[in-house]
Amino acid sequence: MATKLKSYNGTGGTPEPLFLTTTEIEREESMRVLDKRPKVSRRGFLGGSGVTLVAMSILPSGVIMGADSAWAMTAKALKPESFATLVQMSRDIYPHDRLNDSYYAKAVAAFDSQAEESEDSKKMLEDGVAALDAAAMKAHGVTYGQVGWEAERVALLQAIESDGFFQSIRGGLVTGIYNNPDVWPLFGYEGASADQGGYIERGFDDIDWLEA
Amino acid sequence: MATFDLNDDSVVVVIGSGAGGGTVGAELAIKGVKTVILEAGKRHETEDFINDEWGSFGQLAWTDKRTTSGDWRVARDFSGLPAWIVKSVGGSTTHWAGASLRFQEHEWKAQTNYGDVEGASLLDWPIDAEEMAPWYAKAEDRMGVTRTNGIPGLPGNNNFKVMKAGADKLGYKECHTGRMAINSEPRDDRSACLQIGFCFQGCKSAAKWSTLVAEIPKGEETGNLEVRPESHVLKIEHDDSGKVTGVVYADKDGNQQLQKARVVCVAGNSIESPRLLLNSASSMFPDGLANSSGQVGRNYMRHMTGSVYAIFDKPVHMYRGTTMAGIIQDESRHDPSRGFVGGYELETLSLGLPFMAAFLNPGAWGREFTSAMDAFDRMAGMWIVGEDMPQADNRVTLHGSEKDQYGLPVPNVHFDDHPNDIAMRNHAYKQGRALYDAVGAVETYPTPPYPSTHNLGTNRMSAKATDGVVNKWGQTHDVKNLFISDGSQFTTGAAENPTLTIVSLALRQADHIASQMSKGDL
């Protein structure tokens, strides 16, 4: 059932076909739901003897590597240790167990780019990390990234949550995490739909569990 | 498409191309009146719109510098963004969701029907339901409103079905898929709704009415209308007799131009319209143009709003299909036994993942927040929109030191919730949560107001010149050939989404201006 759909382009003249055809989809009995499982292909890295944080390592080369070896990044402006600490801090601010650290690292890469462009940003980030590490050392005798329990790290963050450093990280993560199209399928969000003919043939009204 | 000379002083100049300006400009052109619409934003057509929340926000939103004050939470969460409105041809009709509801009869006379409410500056409109009935009918036909003119309602999406199930359990009687200016079948050379979602991001199928796709093209076809985008009006000029003579605007290169005018209609939405009058102060009008009453900028209303989102143990996918897919009207009545005057509507709403992160509970972090986000595909949502109380000190003023890109004072938007607004919001939160609980919600979230989409009242309509800025035609009390054509002329806000009323008033105003011009009175 390919439907020809017309759209008026708003500038006068003949309506142009906007969507030539919609994808032919058999109506299913049940709701069209999404598989939210991650589909990241894991690749191995040679183990190194770098500094180990809770969920990642910093290799002697300065490369920051995920504990599950699924990702690796190099800091452009920030110290590798600071980059890694920000990754951990980001996960603690918006913890999603189904997101591996690579998504948080990608968000932190945006902060690293700001640090590359602006000395003020770089100082704010490095100073913020240093203060967080100092607070962790005082409370637990280790740096922030080495504090073992999320609740203990969260307590350290709550102590600074009204500070400019915390607020700029948290604010940046709202887009850094949730506006990354790669995470959308993991939350069951399908993104753009006009290019697929909308949802009229793709389950806009297919809810199947409400009582009559 | 017409082009008019800057020195042509026979044209009507309309400032803004949204629901008010786009409609009054197009309707004047259809009536044979030469009209220039000056729009601050660019012209983005249907094919340019983006199915991406932040991408579209960057394309369409009015993000010029503004400041905020007052106890409303928007001032804390979004201090530089009091309003979520549009700078683009079509104005906020590119962004609106399409709900097209008439005011209820009692809402035209709020002062009479609600009595004295402490701290509120309630006033009766100088017009009523009977006066407006034919104009509403004309607007509904023009906009193709569903459930009017024999147009069928839209089909309900998953989000609506959850709302409807809850409404039935609570015993609500008036729950349906709304009166929407979205085509449920092809009409007016525009297609039927494809349930794309992204109604807020500019409709990609043009099924949703906007001045961009519906009114402006019709005006342009007459040869009497020129729409001049990237023309940001800075000041309205007048002569020694106190009549306006033209407007100064910054063109796309930032150069100042003077467009002469026979009549000027201001329709820049309820923050920019009073700001422009205030920025147009002169020795003859020292407190701002048309401000002998001192009411310009006062009585700023933004509707009592809030949202309720709920998560369930099974999928909903609320974002599939129209954003505002259904309505409950049972609470829109005036019934002071609930603890407040006026009423509210409950309307489904959905946000995509990026905007849900920004708006669900701004500033929140940690596992309570992320557990809600983790349930995004199992979430249903509704928006609350109700009548808020006008207050004289809720107002748009010129900032004392902050300047915009043209060197003019930026607007400050001050808003304090009235106790009636708070009582109504709490009632609505309770009802919304009860509704979702009745369908088996595992958690519900009382979400605070977003930056204002319904900005109203800052040049209000009044019978007496001392009580407001414009008369019953939207004509300023002080300057005969100066009109206000947007929602800033609202005397009170009513419970309903304002666009249908703005369009109806604009059609009526165009008829009045054209008739006054032909009589030689303008």
Image: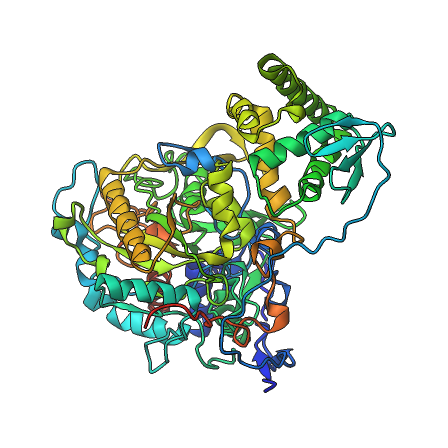
Q: Position of residue A40 (x, y in %)?
A: 72, 53
Identify the colour scheme used. rainbow
Side of B495 relative to B154 (left or right):
left
Front residue of this view, candidates B172 and A49:
A49
Residue nearest the viewer, comparing B47 with B294:
B47
B520 up-or-down from A130: above or below: below
Q: In this rendering, does residue B369 appear at all?
A: yes
Question: Count of labels shown?
Answer: 0
| Residue B513 visible to an observer of this rendering | no
Q: Position of residue B327 (x, y in %)?
A: 33, 64
From the top left corner, tell me how far across and down residue B202 is, in percent. Answer: 54, 62
Residue displayed at 57% across by 82% down: A26
Quadrant, the C terminus of chain B: bottom left
Which sits in the foreground, B164 or B392? B164
Image coords of residue A118 (percent x, y): 74, 28
Split into 4 quadrants, where in the image is the N terminus of chain B?
Answer: bottom right
Q: Give the residue displayed 38% in from the left and 34% down from the top.
A: B286
On screen, residue B194 above or below B11: below
